[in-house]
Structure formats: C-alpha cells, structure tokens
Image (cartoon, rainbow, N blue to C red):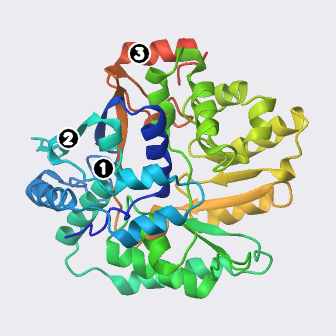
C-alpha cells in the first residue's frame, strides 16, 4: 500500500478545500491526467514510458487510498494549525475518498487516462496521492533495484552546494510529493535535509524551511508550507460573477477566508501581465507576496519588484517564492540576484525527491471543467496549459488580452 495516510498530500490541498467547504460546497469539477514526457527518448529511440501496463496495479492502489480515513492524531494536528477552522476538521473526521469519482483507463498508445469527476469538495484530495501512486508504481516496476547510493550521492552534492560560503540565509523547502520516486525515499531525503541543513519551527536558523507534505511535517516536526494552487483560480472562472474579474474574485474570496493569513498569491494562471493588471495596490498591501511557477523566473522577479515599487510598496517587506522546476544551482542563481531586495523562498520538487539517475515522470493532474464549463490556465510556459475546448481558450485570451504564443 503506497499511500497510508490522507495527510500524505500537500498543505495547499487542505487550505483550498477549506475555502471550498465554506464558499463553494456545491461546485462540480473534472480533472484530467497528463504525462508531459516525450513519447520517444531521444537518446535511445525507445518509448520513454509505458504506463498502460501498470493500470491494474494503479487501480488497486487507488482502491486502497479510498479505504483511508483521518485518524484522531491527524485531525488534532490539523486543528493545531492556526488557519484551519474547527468545522473543517469536523468535516474531515467524516471524510473518505470515493472510488466512484475516479476512472483509470489504459490507452492503445501505452499511455493512461485518469479522469476525476464529481463534487469539488469530495474530489480535491485525489490529485497529489494519485500522482504519487503513478510514480511509485512506475518506478518500482522499472527500477526493481533502485540505485539509492547514487541518489544519496546526488543529495550530498546538493547539500554541499547550499552550504557554500555566503549562502547561510538561503532557505529551501520540499515541494516534491507528487513526483517522488517513492514514499520511503521521500522520507529519507527529508530526514537528511533536516539533519544537515537544520529546521526548527521555533527558530529562524537553518536552511531547510519545511515541506509541503502535511504527513511528514507532522511526523518529523517540520513546518508545513503552502497556500493556493492553479485549480483554485481556474475554478473561479466558472464560480465568479464575471470571467474578466475571476482572478480578482479568487483573491478576494481567499482574503475573506483567511483574513490576512496564507498571503502568497499564485501569479501564473493568466500569465504575468494579466496578473499585474489585477494585482493592484490593495492586493499588493493585502498579500505577503507572490509565487512563480512558469516562465523565466529572473524576469518574473524583476517585474514583481518593479510592480511593488510602482505601487509605492517596499519590496523588502514582501516575499517572492520560486517553485518552477528548480534545481539547487538555479536556486543559488536566483538567490544571488534577488537577495536583499525582497524576502525569498524556494520550493524544490522533483529535483529533491526523484533524482536517482532516472528520467522522472513529468506528470500532472489539472482541473479542466467546473460546473460544466471549461476552465484552464494560460501560463507563461505554454506547454503547461491544459484545455479541452480551443474556443474557450481563444475566448479567455481575448478577455484577458493575452496574445497567442508564437
């Protein structure tokens, strides 16, 4: 059994789910799975992955996932987080994932189709554990004797790079649950990072800031990290009063729920230019900062700092979070460019939890519909867009004045 706890997911799933319970309890949604890896490995000429042969095993693991419920100690931990409300914890005490809302199908191409369809409140927790299941099933079948020594050596190199002179204030966090090699390897990585880079929620010392994984945060005494994900802003395309105002509506609804807590805004659902148009003086002051997840991170950071300055907000009081396909060398470069000019945070995912020398799966599960209407994101990395309705995509570009990528 790969997933043994419903806490084995990212914190932002719970923070978004609480908003759904309180503000959108009747929303109906659909999610679709996608593997972004090329079909053919250019170095070998062979098929890069064949997930279809593992469908039966994936289904069995999802069935086991749907047998889980929250334990008393897990609910007590969630209750201890200052932004989690008691009625939400009461709801989670009755919650179980329902297998009827998810289908997994093998395709002739060797790929798989995973569709999640049902009430948002009852499907939101599928994404992260299902992706972790697909990863672990794939790798335990294709790498039966994993090269853990190579993984440890690579992790040691990363830690050495972070401990170089002049980087003592550089802090990283683990964002790697969805694409981890395995749960056991994920835990080993976190234990090593905690021991060698230090993480103490009561002090600011140490370069390891925490993890997005709630189970490991509870188990290892780490700080759980996360606010909102793309699906939240995407759903607001269907839930808000007017499409053009959907990003503003999403941020205002978030502020209504958390009253100044969890104040990091996600910036790439409509691209950076559209984000900055909506992120006015009110939001600049209300939110603690913004998170980058597509496009050139250096350009993004410079534009965010310029934007704050143009709004007469001191960027040194704001936090920029970088989380798009980071490696440690890229993290160091970003830190060196922006240090002292703002607060900084870095979330590293796949490169921390799935770097043993094998090509990782670039898999995602994204919301594609809400209340029967297509929804999508138009990020600054076009390959990240997922939409099953080209007409809606064109309309969204027109509404937000977003040019077609060349």
Density class for disc 3 (Cα within 10 Å; few <14, some 14-19, many ≥20) is: some
Question: Is 241 rendered above or below residue 76?
Answer: above
Q: Quadrant of the N terminus?
A: bottom left
Density class for disc 2 (Cα within 10 Å; few <14, some 14-19, many ≥20) is: some
Density class for disc 1 (Cα within 10 Å; few <14, some 14-19, many ≥20) is: many
Q: Is residue 198 left or right of residue 405?
A: right
Q: What is the spatial separation of the Cα atoms under label 3 and label 1, in whole angstroms?
A: 26 Å
SS label for mark 2: helix
Q: Nearer the viewer, mark 3 or mark 2?
A: 2
To which residue does mark 2 refer? 101
- Residue drawn at 18 percent across, 45 percent down: 111
Q: What is the spatial separation of the Cα atoms under label 3 and label 2, in whole angstroms?
A: 25 Å
Residue 292 pos. (x, y %): 62, 46
- Residue drawn at 25 percent across, 58 percent down: 134
Let me know if residue 326 appears in the view. Answer: yes
SS label for mark 1: loop
Let me know if residue 296 appears in the view. Answer: no
Between 284 and 277, the residue placed more toward the observer is 284
Q: CB atoms at circles 1 and 2 under 8 Å apart?
A: yes
Q: What is the spatial separation of the Cα atoms under label 1 and label 2, in whole angstroms?
A: 9 Å
Q: Earlier in the sequence, mark 3 or mark 2?
A: 2
Q: Nearer the viewer, mark 3 or mark 1?
A: 1
On residue 173, the disc is none
Residue 137 pos. (x, y %): 20, 64
Question: Is 62 rendered above or below residue 140?
Answer: above
SS label for mark 3: helix
On residue 126, the disc is 1
Between 327 and 121, the residue placed more toward the observer is 121
Q: Earlier in the sequence, mark 1 or mark 2?
A: 2
To which residue does mark 3 refer? 392
């Amino acid at each position: 059994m790969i997933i043994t706890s419903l806490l084995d997911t990212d914190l932002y799933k719970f923070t978004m789910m609480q908003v759904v319970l309180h503000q959108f309890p009747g929303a109906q949604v659909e999610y679709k799975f996608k593997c972004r890896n090329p079909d053919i490995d250019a170095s070998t000429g062979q098929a890069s992955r064949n997930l279809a042969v593992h469908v039966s095993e994936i289904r069995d693991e999802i069935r086991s996932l749907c047998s889980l419920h929250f334990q008393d100690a897990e609910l007590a931990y969630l209750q201890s987080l200052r932004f989690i409300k008691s009625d939400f914890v009461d709801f989670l005490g009755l919650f179980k994932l329902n297998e009827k809302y998810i289908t997994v199908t093998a395709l002739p191409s060797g790929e798989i189709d995973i569709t999640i369809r049902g009430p948002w409140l009852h499907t939101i927790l599928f994404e992260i554990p299902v992706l972790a299941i697909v990863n672990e099933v794939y790798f335990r079948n294709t790498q039966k004797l994993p090269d853990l020594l190579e993984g440890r050596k690579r992790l040691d190199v990363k830690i050495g790079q972070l401990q170089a002179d002049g980087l003592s204030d550089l802090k990283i966090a683990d964002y790697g649950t969805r694409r981890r090699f395995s749960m056991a390897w994920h835990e080993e990585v976190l234990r090593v990072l905690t021991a060698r880079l230090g993480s103490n929620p009561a002090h600011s010392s140490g370069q390891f800031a925490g993890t997005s994984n709630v189970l490991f945060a509870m188990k290892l005494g780490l700080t759980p990290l996360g606010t909102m994900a793309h699906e939240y802003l995407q759903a607001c395309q269907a839930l808000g009063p007017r499409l053009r105002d959907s990003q503003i509506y999403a941020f205002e609804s978030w502020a209504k729920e958390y009253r100044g807590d969890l104040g990091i805004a996600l910036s790439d659902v409509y691209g950076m230019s559209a984000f900055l148009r909506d992120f006015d003086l009110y939001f600049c002051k209300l939110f603690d900062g913004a998170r980058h997840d597509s496009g050139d991170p250096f350009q993004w950071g410079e534009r965010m700092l310029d934007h704050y300055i143009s709004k007469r907000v001191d960027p040194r009081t704001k936090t920029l979070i970088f989380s798009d396909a980071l490696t440690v060398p890229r993290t160091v470069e970003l830190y060196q460019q922006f240090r002292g000019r703002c607060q900084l945070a870095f979330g590293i995912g796949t490169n921390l939890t799935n770097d043993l020398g094998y090509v990782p799966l670039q898999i995602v599960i994204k919301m594609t519909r809400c209340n029967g209407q297509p929804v999508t994101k138009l990020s600054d990395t076009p390959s990240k867009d997922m939409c099953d309705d080209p007409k809606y995509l064109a309309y969204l570009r027109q509404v937000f004045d977003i040019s077609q990528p060349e």
